[in-house]
Structure formats: structure tokens, C-alpha cells
Image (cartoon, rainbow, N blue to C red):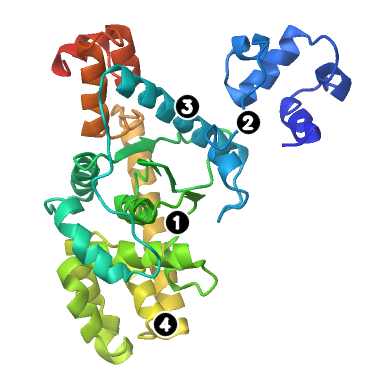
Amino acid sequence: MTKYDLLSSVNEGLKKKIEISDIYSEEINLNVLKRIDKIFNKGLNFYLDPKDIEVNKEASIFFRKTHFNSDLNIGTKKIVNHFEELKLNLSTISKLSDLSFERLIEIYKTSDSPQKVANEVRSKLYPEFTLNSRDFLKAFIGKLGANNIFVFEFIETWNKKEKANIDGFFLQPNFIVLKRQQKSFKREIFTLAHELGHYLLNKEEVEQVTTLNIASENLSKIERWCNDFAYYFLINNYEKFINDIKFANSQNDYYLQEIEDISKFTHLSKLSLYTRLLYENKISKSSYNNIREDFDNQYRLRIAEEDRKKELDKLKGIKIGGAVPKPINSPLFISTIQTAFYEGVINEYEVCKRLNIKPEKLEAYL
């Protein structure tokens, strides 16, 4: 961020604009400082600290990497910063609590076959299957936690001004963060499997993981490997059905029923399966585009119907539940906080704050 980018952000929504000299001067007005802190959310004490800000590779992924696969906006950078601080904090808590999270899965290379690696690690990392996508995601997070891999979700509310333009990221050595996809858990499951690929390669990245990327020819070797790994990991025993498909066209109804069945039992979305067929030249680009457009229309109609139902319920005086969804807590994170409490490293208030629970729910966790 340049100083003029900062000035633009500070002045957003203001009638009386702040000048560059109001920020870069010997003294700074408290109200101006508060406007600055609305961007960075550090608390005013951060700016009063006389120590220089530490700039080293350990401090942030933004110092460790010079290029990212997505153009990261300020909302994304704030999310990444938040979880990097959490990672460092958990590292301190773990040391004080005599906890060790050594790597239990070997590091692979992009020269290794993603299909072979998926088959190798599935017995350790694939959860017990359930048809409900959210339950499967929760079990997947739990399975990774059992192998010393932290997984966190972040929630973006509809009214948040600066939404993050990413789906997930991996931070060394064992931190995966996902954007909660409340309306498409299958997309979030694929993102988790993709970021697991980054963990297996031990290559950090902050990115938007889109279905279309599966068929893109412009992906880096690492991104191609992670996409392929995610596909093979999730397709499990249904790979044979995809292999047996010759060419999807109107004569075989584009294998719609078969694709729907595979999606149901793998938690790969129907669009991601068709994208895989496109990547393997088993469907024409025009047919794929038509199917994709049809899926998009179905999705829009479903959302419109949900909104219409809410409006009708509102007119009837039916109370509509509008609670913000809670992120899924990794069992590894919960057990780490529990141990830190038992060891006297943190108090009850800290437990409630970190697990985002009310004090009356504390006994259920301790």
C-alpha cells in the first residue's frame, strides 16, 4: 500500500477530506489515527509502541513471497494478517503448554504423481464418508487435526465493506484457512483438498480456488498439482466411472444422471466434474459452456426462491432466523486451548474469546 492508497482508504466516506500532511507529520490528530486504525484493526497502542515493526520472512507470508496467484485486496490482507497473528500466538501457547505438532505426513514434490499421492494419503486423511456436505467438511477438518494440521474458517457477513477475494490459503508449517461457503460446501471441500495439496508440497499460497482453474492451461506447476491432487483425493473409488466416459454429448444426455450420482457420493460439485471432463477432452467447450450456464441459472433461481420465501414469511409475521453462521472449530484447536487452560497458560476469559463461546457454555469445553 502506497501512502496515497492509505490516504484514499482513510478518506472513504468523508465529506471533509484528510490531507496527506495530516498523516505524514510530526504529530497526528487522534481522530485521524482512529481512521487509520479502522483499516488495520491493530488498536491504538500499536502506533504508540516505540519499537520498529519487525520485517522478516518469519513475520509474514507477504515478506516470504513476492508473487501470489491472485490479486489480493485489502480485505484479504487483513484476513491473512489476522491468522498469521493467531498462528504465532498458538505457537507461543503450545511451547508454554509443552505441546508439539510435529509433521506426521511426508513432504512431496510436484514430480510425484498427484494421483499416486492421493491414493497414499487417503487412508490417513480421508474422513468417514457422509452424504451431508457440511458434516463431511467437519469430519475432514477433524481428520486433518488428528494429523497435526490446523484448519480454520473465516466468515464474511453480507454487509462487510471489504470482502476478501480469496477462497483459502496455506501457511507453513501446518495452517490451512478457508472462506466459509455457506451456500456451497462442496466448493469449500474442494478448496480444503486443494490447500491440503499445498501442505503436502509445503508450498505457501494465498489464492482464489475456482472450478474453472481445473481446465486452465495457464496454471503454474504447483497449482496444477494441487488441483489434480484435490480431484483424485475426493473422487476416491469413482475415478473408474469418469475414465469409462467416452464423450459427453446429447446422445448420452451428457451423462447427467451419472455425474449427479458421482457428485453425491464424492462431494465434488457437478460443475467441477464437467470441468474435469473438459480438461480430459471428453466434452466440447460449447457443450460445457451450455451446461455451466444452465447450472448458474438453476443456482440463481434457487436463491431467488429462497429470498421470495423469506419475504412471504416476513409478510406473514413469521420470525426469520438471521444468525451469522459460526465457523467450524478444529478439534486440534479446541484441544490446544483446553491444554493451555489446564496448564495455566490462559484463563477462562481467553478460552471463551478464542473459541468464540459464551461463558455459560464453558463447562462443555473443559
- Seen in the picture, residue 26 relative to 166 is either above or below; the reply is above
Q: Are marks 4 and 3 in contact (CB under 8 Å)?
A: no
Please give the label number shown on residue 55. Answer: 2
Quadrant the N terminus occupies: top right
Specify whether 340 is left or right of 56: left
Is disc 1 surrounded by few (<14), some (14 to 19) or many (20+) residues within 10 Å? many
The residue lying at 56 percent from left, 38 percent from top is: 57
- Residue nearest the observer in this picture, 261 or 317: 261
User: Which type of secondary structure does the marked residue at label 3 adopt?
Assistant: helix
Amino acid marked by disc 3: Glu
Mark-to-mark CA distance, 4 and 3: 46 Å
Q: 160 or 235: which is nearer to us? A: 235
Q: Is disc 2 surrounded by few (<14), some (14 to 19) or many (20+) residues within 10 Å?
A: few
Can you identify the residue that label 1 sits on? Answer: 209
Observer able to see residue 310:
yes
Give left or right: position of 175 versus 14: left
Front-lying residue, 100 or 166: 100
